[in-house]
Amino acid sequence: MKFDLTPKKFSELQVEALVVYVFEKETELKGTIRDVDRVTGGLITSLLSTKELTGKPFEYAYARNPEGLQAKRIFVFGAGKKETFDLGQLRKLAGAIARTLRSKSILNFALLKRSAFDSAGAAQAVVEGIILAHFDIDRYKTDNEPKNPIQTVLLAGGDQARKPAILQAIERGRIVAEAQNFARELINEPSNKLTPTHLAERASVMAREFDLRIEILEREDMEKLGMGALLSVARGSEEPPKLIVLTYDPQGVEHPSKTIGLVGKGITFDTGGISLKPPEGMEKMKYDMSGAASMIAVMRALALLKPKVKVIAMVPTTENMPGGRAQKPGDVQTSMSGKTIEVINTDAEGRLVLSDAIAYVKKLGATHLIDMATLTGAVSIALGDVRVGVMGNHQKWMNAFLRAAEECGEKMWQLPMDEEYGDLIKSKIADLKNTGGRYASTITAAKFLEVFAGDTPWIHLDIAGTEWLEEAKPYCSEGPTGIGIRSVIQTVCTQR
């Protein structure tokens, strides 16, 4: 897919479609949209006055062979309320435009900028929205009509004096969105197609392509390191566990002041183990490796964006299955850190694999941590599918992440981490237990991980409620979202 900033006037663009947008209750057209309306003989005014178009988000109308234009069609989209229109909404609008035009077999179009946003920031948001809109979950259907991707997008009306910065933003948007789609493809794979071994292979192929260092630890390696928590989850599966370690070393930086450790939960299928889940909806548990896929995707992007900070990604991956050797409620496991854990519920397995991964990435020198996991169903009860639950132990590090998330248009919500919540995971027979029961269970899961993070600045993202869309949106497919990837990339890239 090719993106470019064109200096041509909108009336001279020889494309299959010229796309413009209007806001709700926009009674007086100004600027470039007024010029488009005038050239086309009042087409936009007519659409608005007849209520054929109201400006509500993602609705549209179009006309063929419009007067005064060389474009074959003109599409007018609704952008919602002007006062709440931001880069996040622009990203979604671009996605809705792409999915609509693609459904009509339009392969090239021009989008006319009319927002007051910085041209580079707007260009990046548009590119991200369009690329993300091309992901679909139906790759295993045999009777699908092939969906041709959009080939060329021209950004019209941008500041030509800032063309180098805008082109740089376009490339950054491409890198980030392609990484996000890479993660979504992995998450969408059924568990018979993406075992821990397959995930390690996919990560290895990516690392070779993007010049990242990679090491795959086998069961024997983990045993030598004393990773009893991670290995306890793997006991019930015939599939061998893997620990994927990806490293990005910045060029030209001999002694980076920070080493960021990224940890992603990689349960390629979660039955719950002996504490078996109900069968309804269990097929979605293939997505329990979303954190792992997301952190692998982050590394893919960082290899191209080249931030000036060292990053180590740690991906513990296994299945959580019942079986004759599976761990049982009441078992006590010894983690790599030496902490002992009473297993109350084998379906609280994510925090077990993360605990050893956090300990190991700290051993390798990580000074700042971010982990990402589909960890608790309770986060969906608290925040629905709108915001990611975010917790941590260091407010300055948290603030840096929340600023990055806001810049990226990803919605987060910081939950409290009061010491009293830690009382719920105290065990009578071990150092701690792996679940504190129903109350505040998203927070107590984070309190469990906090024990292993220790004094190292650490952020935990619980993406269980936001990683999977049950229904398609106008701007994106149903299925995996890749939420959090943009925010983590932005956080890392702003560190020095």
Image (tube, rainbow, N blue to C red):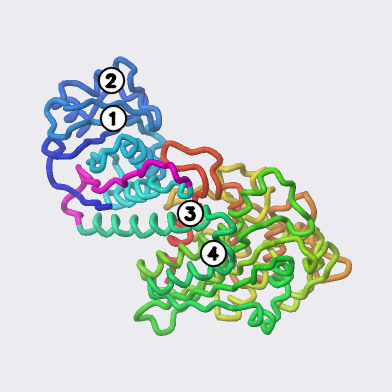
Q: What are the residue bounds of the magenta stretch?
A: 141-163
Given contact means CB atoms under 8 Å apart, are the residues at marks 4 and 2 in contact? no
Given contact means CB atoms under 8 Å apart, are the residues at marks 2 and 1 in contact? yes
Q: Kindly identify which residue carries mark 2.
A: 47
Residue lying furthest top: 50
Residue lying furthest front: 143
* Disc nearer the start of the sequence (4/3): 3
Q: Kindly identify which residue carries mark 4.
A: 397
Q: Secondary structure at mark 4?
A: helix
In this rendering, the answer to whether 213 lies above or below 472 is below
Q: In which quadrant is the C terminus drawn?
A: bottom left
Q: Kindly identify which residue carries mark 3.
A: 184
The quarter holding residue 240 reads: bottom right
Q: Secondary structure at mark 3?
A: helix
What's the CA distance linking mark 2 and mark 1?
Answer: 9 Å
Q: How many numbered circles are shown? A: 4
Crowd around label 1: few <14 · some 14–19 · many ≥20 (10 Å):
many
Which of discs 3 and 2 lies nearer the camera? The answer is 3
Inspect the image, locate mark 1, and give the three-letter code of the amino acid beneath it: Val
In this rendering, the answer to whether 158 lies above or below 307 is above
